[in-house]
Image: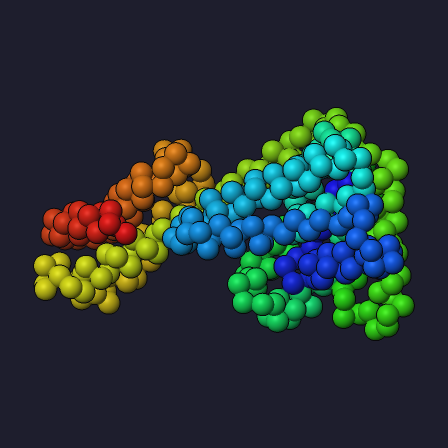
Amino acid sequence: MILVMCGLPGAGKSYWASRLHSSAISRKGGETRFDDDVRHVDFDAVEAGLLREGSGKDNSNRIDTWHSARVMALEQAQDILLEEVAERHRVVVVLDDNMYYASMRREAYQLAARYGVGYGCLHVATPLDVALVQNKSRPAGRSVTEEVIRRMHTKLQVPDPNTRSWEANTVAIGNITTLETQDNEAETLRKIWTVIERGYKTPATIVEVSSAEEEVAKEEARQRTRGSLLHATELMLRKIIGTAMQLVAAGDGLFNVKPSSFGPRFSAAKAAVMREVGKGNAQSFTQDWILQQADAKNILVGKLFIAMREKGREEETAALLELERQTLAKLVNM
């Protein structure tokens, strides 16, 4: 069966995944057997592996790496489910990710349904302030910025069996710091195993999504795409502006302007481009970004310098065109 973890970064999801694995062994008297075999699919670990391999060295590629990691993690889960079905033994596939959109969890539910296995959800309902504190104590490479956690908190769609019947097999647990005694932890683990046992008894079935739910899912997908696009756009614009400023500083008077005076103007031009992308007016950019980031970079450079020239003096036009040419040339090799 599939057990989905849901909660903010720093909530304690990986802690409970580890405790679940340990309790599975203790339930079997310390013996390793196939029944109640807990497999941990850590989405963060998959992404970290891709980054180590070099696919995400450039920050502007982090969005692609994140998407690739999700695909790979779900493929890992699928391989384990194939083993469960073929060997006819009990396996709990723990999908350890934030799963903050209902559509993310529904994808896992549909995967369980395709293989005729159970589905359950563990919502680690840690308060925002506690998650922020716990995030700071996470190992290097696993912590995220406060901005990311706060943004995810505003977007989190709490599992709700009342509006999404396929989320009926869900349990919400509190923060690990509130578990003052071993008995409290044992009781929490008992609740988790109850969800698992219920999942074994009642396999997931293909969900017929209502038109309203389908429209919500589409909007969620649009919001994720827009958020990823805006983030990637901002990262790339920072890189373009940094490159241009270096060229201005090393231009030996070619651009006839103090580098410091270009800073505010680039910021204003960047804001104008971000507004255009945010409003969905940059359709050509969106398509090129998906197809090839190099093309998107060229488009962004063009849009940035168009905004610069619109606010600049006529006598600066030639210098700005030359700066645009040099910036593009330098970015080709970066």
Name the residue at 57% across, 64% down. Answer: 143
Left or right of residue 278: residue 177: right
Residue at 61% x, 71% y is 137
Colouring scheme, one of rainbow, by chain, secondary structure, one colour = rainbow
Q: How many marks?
A: 0
In the rendered image, is residue 172 in sight?
Answer: no
Q: Quadrant of residue 127?
A: bottom right
In this view, 123 is above or below 174: above
* x then y, percent, for residue 228: 49, 46
Residue 18 in view, yes or no: yes
Q: Quadrant of residue 136?
A: bottom right
Q: Position of residue 252 (x, y in %)?
A: 10, 64
> Along the horizontal axis of the image, is 91 left or right of 334?
right
Q: Residue at x 73, y 56 (%)?
A: 17
Where, by quadrant of the figure, is residue 243 drawn? bottom left
**Residue 88: percent from left, percent from top:** 80, 35
Left or right of 89: which side holds 96?
Answer: left
Where residue 220 appears, x then y in whole percent?
Answer: 61, 39
Quadrant for the N terminus, please: top right
Q: Residue at x 18, y 61 (%)?
A: 248
Q: Is residue 289 above or below residue 188?
A: above
Horizontal side of 254 relative to 288 (left or right) equals: left
